[in-house]
């Protein structure tokens, strides 16, 4: 704020002085803020003719329109909303000067300049607080902001804007004194009057559940005796006594006609909390538990049915809340015809509520028998999509499914749906709609999982070739979607003519598509696409397709030529695909040096096949040339090969080599021989520790500890199978294990 002040200097000379000062923002100027709590406040008056339910929902409060007069009670309505659940939120409400509380409520705390209330907030649910105040002085008064401050969550408070309140004199004839005013209304709803049914249900639960115990006071109140004559154990009454207690309690079941809505909530809450009793035909003395629970569920179903008859026909907020409570009750009721019929009526009343669709699916766990409920599910199928449609489809019978338009079914089904495509393919109208959809590459790509699983072989012939091109691209260039083998299998079902496939290979530009086409042509016996105009890069695939399956040398030469043509990083992945395509010839006929040259393309199964065909001399040569990297699981066939594997283990310190050694008797013997020859370096000590742990041996002796012989033998069996040991001692132990374990 800047002010101009004129002062006098010597000889009366006027001086011009500029003073600059700062002040804090006044409470009346403070803007509203919400970070993240949102707070609203308003002056209201209460309708004295409002019902208890209207008062509980805040529907009795009406905004004050006329001027605020001295001595006339007002209700300050405060609404607090938070985006997440918060506990122990303090609402500090600074009152204007001259505004007083008629008396001190128990849930309001007076501060120096405000009153404070405490509440818990649910996520996104407005919490309404109400406070009765009386203005006592005429005038215009400052009204600071009302602030909501969550404990344990600093700087997350929110508040209203500040303002002013003007109080006028009371009109003539309004002469009540402050002392004559009605008592203050509590900021929270006062405790409801005791409901006998709720107390009865609590005693019932104490008598019913095995880990609970009814108090002698409760028994005396409901049964007229404290329970001394019943048999009690460590955890309450014995089973027979509990059955007698529950039988007597049924005779004292209170009447709830005055408040059937509250009774329904009480029964629902008990069924939700009560533990389902274990049923055992060999323990008939516990049968009363199931009968008692069935009776509770039957009463709850009757109350839910009656509540539906009296439910409002409108689906406003209050009506939907009531229907949601009825659904919670139906969820606890026993399955049967009456429950299905009631659920169908509930759907007719609640279908326009936001939660109706998901709730109906929760209420119907299996395909229903009631025709009205089936009709409700058919109606639901038209309204929902995604997982809700899939779940609805599973609940429908075949006639109801067939009645749904096939186009709608295909539109609503998820990409990985189950049972839908197979059902449509088996009916003329569905098959026709499905054939039209298969012409869309987008549909085939998005629904490939379901199509691969359910589409009949003959319908794959309706899929256009360019759709498979999209599948191949996704399969080889993304971590999601179909794998290459699946695409190849489905492409084989499509049975495209070989010339069409050759023409596609000659014009293919995407490496992944070239690979899939080449694999398909090779499976069909084709040897190339000669004579066709080829785009750049396709000729090498034509050459690869013409390779002899036993010519490893030509396969290696082809790969070397391809690498010379594509220097630098293989960004497209085509060289890796080409290596994978030519791999069978290298695995079948390649020398150890050639195998190592192309090892990047090898999988474990490829190494296994190559190892099986190599001679012992070739195996030794391969192991000598293998220096680093992950070692394939080469199972040694003799002591010389095992020794070469041990040297590889020492060179590479790769424990895959140890796993290979421990997969055969000669390998185990080799490991033991080296581990028993001191001194051992640190790596050998680690090998010994792993070996002893894997085979259940003592680390210092590498022999089974006393009493652990059986475990050690089973460990050997696990690692190397029936050839674990041929010693007579082990064979005798194995026979005894078979007898003991039924092996």
Image (cartoon, rainbow, N blue to C red):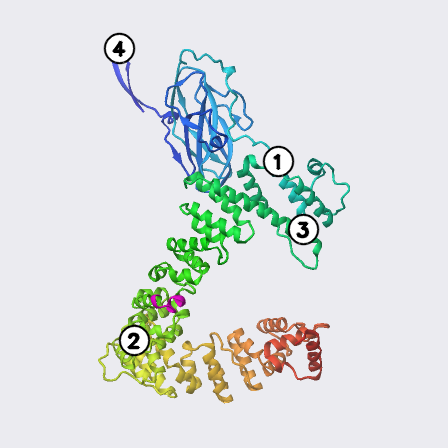
Q: Is residue 82 in view from this perspective?
A: no
Disc on res. 288: 3
Left or right, 198 with reference to 237: left
Residue designated by label 4: 12
Does the magenta-highlighted stretch encompass residue 393? no
Frontmost residue, 578 versus 680: 578
**What segment carries the magenta color?**
421-429
Residue at image position (77%, 41%) is 228
Q: Looking at the rendered structure, which numbered label has been put on residue 397?
A: none
Asked if the stretch drawn in magenta spans residue 426, the answer is yes
Q: Position of residue 677 (x, y in %)?
A: 64, 79
Judge by depth and name the residue closer to the eye, 173 or 339.
339
Relative to the observer, which residue lies in front, 500 or 433? 433
- Looking at marks 2 and 3 on the same chain, the residue that comes earlier in the sequence is marked by 3
Mark before the other along the chain sequence, 3 or 1: 1
Q: Which residue is label 2 attached to?
A: 566
Q: Within 10 angstroms of label 3, few (less than 14), some, or many (20 or more) residues?
A: some
Residue 71 image-quadrant placement:
top left
Residue underneath mark 1: 196
- Between circles 3 and 4, the one closer to the viewer is 3
- For label 4, the crowd category at 10 Å Cα-Cα, with few meaning under 14, some 14 to 19 and many 20 or more, is few
Residue 713: horizontal and vertical position, in percent?
Answer: 66, 76
Distance CA(mark 1)–CA(mark 2): 87 Å
- Label 3 vs label 4: CA separation? 109 Å
Q: Is disc 4 placed on a helix, strand or loop?
A: helix
Select label 1 or label 2 by which is in front.
1
Q: Earlier in the sequence, mark 3 or mark 4?
A: 4
**Crowding at label 1, few (<14), some or many (≥20) Cα neighbours within 10 Å?**
few
Q: Answer with mark 2 or mark 4, whichever residue precedes in sequence.
A: 4
């Amino acid at each position: 704020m800047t002010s101009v002040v004129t002062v006098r200097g010597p000889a009366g000379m006027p001086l011009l002085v500029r003073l600059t000062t700062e002040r804090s923002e006044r409470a009346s100027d403070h803007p509203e803020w919400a970070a993240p709590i949102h707070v609203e406040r308003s002056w209201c008056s209460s309708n004295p003719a409002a019902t208890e339910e209207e008062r509980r929902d805040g529907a009795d409060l009406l905004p004050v329109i006329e001027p605020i007069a001295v001595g006339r009670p007002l209700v300050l309505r405060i609404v607090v909303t938070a985006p997440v659940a918060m506990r122990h939120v303090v609402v500090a409400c600074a009152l204007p000067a001259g505004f007083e509380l008629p008396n001190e409520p128990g849930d309001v705390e007076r501060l120096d300049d405000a009153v404070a209330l405490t509440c818990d907030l649910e996520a996104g649910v407005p919490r309404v607080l109400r406070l009765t105040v009386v203005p006592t002085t005429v005038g215009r008064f400052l009204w600071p902001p009302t602030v909501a401050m969550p404990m344990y969550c600093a700087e997350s408070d929110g508040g209203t804007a500040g303002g002013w309140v003007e109080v006028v004199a009371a009109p003539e004839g309004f002469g009540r004194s402050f002392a004559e005013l009605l008592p203050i209304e509590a900021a929270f709803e006062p405790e409801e009057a005791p409901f006998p049914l709720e107390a009865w249900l609590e005693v019932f639960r104490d008598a019913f559940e095995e880990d609970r115990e009814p108090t002698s006071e409760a028994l005396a109140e409901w049964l007229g005796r404290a329970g001394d004559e019943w048999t009690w154990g460590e955890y309450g009454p014995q089973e027979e006594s509990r059955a007698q207690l529950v039988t007597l309690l049924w005779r004292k079941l209170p009447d709830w006609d005055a408040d059937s809505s509250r009774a329904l909530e009480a029964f629902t809450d008990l069924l939700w909390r009560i533990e389902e009793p274990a049923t055992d035909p060999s323990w008939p003395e516990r049968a009363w538990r199931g009968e008692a629970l069935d009776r509770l569920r039957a009463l709850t179903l009757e109350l839910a049915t009656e509540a539906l008859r009296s439910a409002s026909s409108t689906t406003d907020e209050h009506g939907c809340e009531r229907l949601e409570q009825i659904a919670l009750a139906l969820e606890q009721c026993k399955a049967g015809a009456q429950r299905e019929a009631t659920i169908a009526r509930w759907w007719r009343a609640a279908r326009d509520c936001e939660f109706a669709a998901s709730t109906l699916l929760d209420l119907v766990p299996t395909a229903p028998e009631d025709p009205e409920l089936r009709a409700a599910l058919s109606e639901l199928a038209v309204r929902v999509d995604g997982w809700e449609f899939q779940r609805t489809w599973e609940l429908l019978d075949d006639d109801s499914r067939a009645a749904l338009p096939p186009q709608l079914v295909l539109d609503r089904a998820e990409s990985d749906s189950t049972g839908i495509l197979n059902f449509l393919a088996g009916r003329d109208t569905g098959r026709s709609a499905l054939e039209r959809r298969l012409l869309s590459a987008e549909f085939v790509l998005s629904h490939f999982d379901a199509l691969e699983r359910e589409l009949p072989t003959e319908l794959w012939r309706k899929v256009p070739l360019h759709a498979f091109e999209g599948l191949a691209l996704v399969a080889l260039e993304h971590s999601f979607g179909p794998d290459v083998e699946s695409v190849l299998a489905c492409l084989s079902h499509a049975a495209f003519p070989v010339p069409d496939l050759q023409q596609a290979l000659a014009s293919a530009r995407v490496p992944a598509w070239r690979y899939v086409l080449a694999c398909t042509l090779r499976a069909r016996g084709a040897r190339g696409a000669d004579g066709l105009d080829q785009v750049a890069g396709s000729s090498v695939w034509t050459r690869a397709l013409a390779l002899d399956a036993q010519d490893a040398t030509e396969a290696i030469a082809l790969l070397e030529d391809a690498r010379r043509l594509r220097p630098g990083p293989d960004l497209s992945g085509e060289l890796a695909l080409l290596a994978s395509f030519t791999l069978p010839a290298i695995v079948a006929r390649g020398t150890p040096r050639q195998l190592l040259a192309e090892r990047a393309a090898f999988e474990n199964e490829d190494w296994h096949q190559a190892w099986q065909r190599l001679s012992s001399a070739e195996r030794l040569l391969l192991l000598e040339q293998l220096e680093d990297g992950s070692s394939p699981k080469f199972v040694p066939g003799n002591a010389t090969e095992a020794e070469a594997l041990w040297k590889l283990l020492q060179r590479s310190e790769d424990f895959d080599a140890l796993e290979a050694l421990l997969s055969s008797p000669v390998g185990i013997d080799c490991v033991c021989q080296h581990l028993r020859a001191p001194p051992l370096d640190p790596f050998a000590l680690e090998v010994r520790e792993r070996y002893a742990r894997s085979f259940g041996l003592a680390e210092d002796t590498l022999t089974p500890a006393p009493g652990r012989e059986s475990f050690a033998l089973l460990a050997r069996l696990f690692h190397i199978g029936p050839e674990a040991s041929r010693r007579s001692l082990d064979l005798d132990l194995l026979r005894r294990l078979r007898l003991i374990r039924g092996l």
